[in-house]
Image (cartoon, helix red, strand yellow):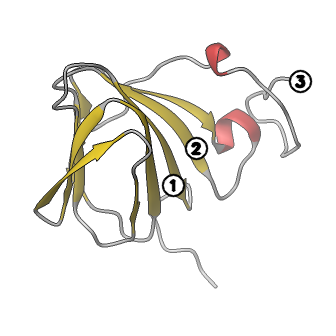
Amino acid sequence: MSPSEGKPQEAFVSHTVQVPWQEFPGHFGGALSKALVRPETCGSRRIDFRISCYQPMAYVQEHVHKVQEQVYHVLEGEGLLTLDGRKVVMRRNDYVFVPPGVHHGFTNEGTTPLVFLVVTTPVEDEEVPL
């Protein structure tokens, strides 16, 4: 079963190849992602799960989240991650947890595509009332 837009939340199995590549705002130079799990793809309420592929020199500009937490997990290639001004090389099997309030950006400084998973929660970067 494939997920469908606007459908209530239910379990599903799908194929990554069926999801289109997108260049989200703030991403440049061939920094593409497939939004696999999001409210509009499957009704997810708390998780934004993507696979990203950045061509050499592609990047997401430095930014900061108010309440969102993120995990990046590198599958292939290498990139330069910036965390509050500190630069860290990320390679295959490396992962990072980025809590709210940490300025971060990611650039493919390698010679091959940089492929990584991104998990973000909550889906929107706004305060959720208790």
Number of marks: 3
Q: Secondary structure at mark 1?
A: strand
Q: Residues within 10 Å of mark 3 (few under 14, many from 20)?
A: few
- Which comes sooner in the sequence, label 1 or label 2? 2
- Give the Cα separation between the discs numbered 2 and 3: 18 Å
The correct choice, above or below, for 48 with respect to 110 in the image is: below
**Label 2: which residue?**
49
Contact flag, marks 1 and 2 (Cβ < 8 Å): yes
The percent coordinates of residue 45 (x first, y second) are 69, 55
Residue nearest the observer in this picture, 13 or 39: 13
At a point 27% along the width and 69% down the height, the residue shown is: 102
- The quadrant in which the C terminus is found is bottom right
The correct choice, above or below, for 34 with respect to 50 in the image is: above
- Give the Cα separation between the discs numbered 3 and 1: 24 Å
- Residue projecting furthest to the bottom: 130
At a point 79% along the width and 29% down the height, the residue shown is: 3
Q: Residues within 10 Å of mark 2 (few under 14, many from 20)?
A: many
Residue 124 visible in image: yes
Q: Secondary structure at mark 2?
A: strand
The percent coordinates of residue 82 (x first, y second) are 18, 55
Image-based side of 46 in relation to 99, left or right:
right
User: What label does residue 32 carry, if any?
Assistant: none
User: What label does residue 1 carry, if any?
Assistant: 3
